Image: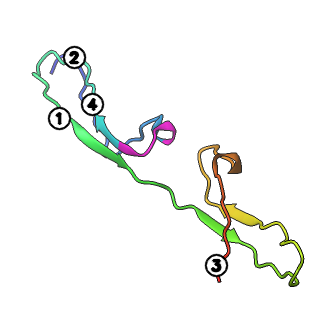
């Protein structure tokens, strides 16, 4: 059989997936040179979806004729080291 060993894995992990932005990426596979094989590989696809983000705006009470209190929100779901500074909130009242 020669000195080359053929190994395989049923699953694996891309080491930098969490640093990639949302979108589509090609997955390529590298195989060591095998003396007795003409190796062909395919190009697969990796699709990264947007993460869910929930913005919960707090209820407020005010009195007629006074200045509205500052509106506040709690932001949940930021990932990959992102913090609330990347979220620009705009508040509006209707009625």
4 and 2 marks in contact (CB < 8 Å): no
The quadrant where residue 46 appears: top left
Cα gap from disc 4 to disc 2, whole angstroms: 13 Å
Whether residue 39 sits left or right of residue 78 in the image: it is left
Instruction: Name the front one of labels 1 and 2.
Output: 1
Identify residue for label 1.
Answer: 42
The mark nearer the N terminus, 1 or 2, is 2
Identify residue for label 2.
Answer: 33
Magenta region includes residue 20: yes
Residue 40: percent from left, percent from top: 13, 28
Q: Residues within 10 Å of mark 4 (few under 14, many from 20)?
A: few
Q: Residues within 10 Å of mark 3 (few under 14, many from 20)?
A: few
Identify residue for label 4.
Answer: 29
Which quadrant of the figure contains the N terminus? top left
The mark nearer the N terminus, 2 or 3, is 2
Residue 71: percent from left, percent from top: 78, 67
Identify residue for label 3.
Answer: 94
Whether residue 22 sits left or right of residue 35 in the image: it is right
Disc 2 secondary structure class: loop
Task: Identify the residue at horizontal 80%, vertical 78% (top origin).
Answer: 60
Task: Identify the residue at horizontal 88%, vertical 84% (top origin).
Answer: 63
Cα gap from disc 3 to disc 4, whole angstroms: 55 Å
Cα gap from disc 4 to disc 1, whole angstroms: 7 Å
The mark nearer the N terminus, 3 or 4, is 4
In this picture, which residue range is highlighted in magenta? 18-23
Disc 3 secondary structure class: loop
The quadrant where residue 70 appears: bottom right
- Relative to 37, residue 11 above or below: below
Q: How is the image coloured?
A: rainbow
Which quadrant of the figure contains the C terminus? bottom right
Residue 25: percent from left, percent from top: 32, 38
């Amino acid at each position: 059989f020669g000195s080359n060993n053929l190994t395989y894995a049923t699953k694996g992990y891309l080491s930098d997936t969490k640093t990639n932005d949302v979108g589509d990426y090609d997955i390529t596979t590298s195989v060591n040179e095998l003396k007795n094989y003409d190796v062909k590989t395919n190009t697969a696809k990796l699709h990264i979806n947007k993460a869910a983000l929930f913005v919960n705006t707090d209820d407020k009470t005010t009195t007629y004729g006074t200045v509205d209190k500052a509106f506040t929100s709690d932001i949940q779901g930021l990932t990959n080291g992102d913090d609330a500074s990347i979220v620009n909130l705009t508040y509006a009242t209707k009625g």
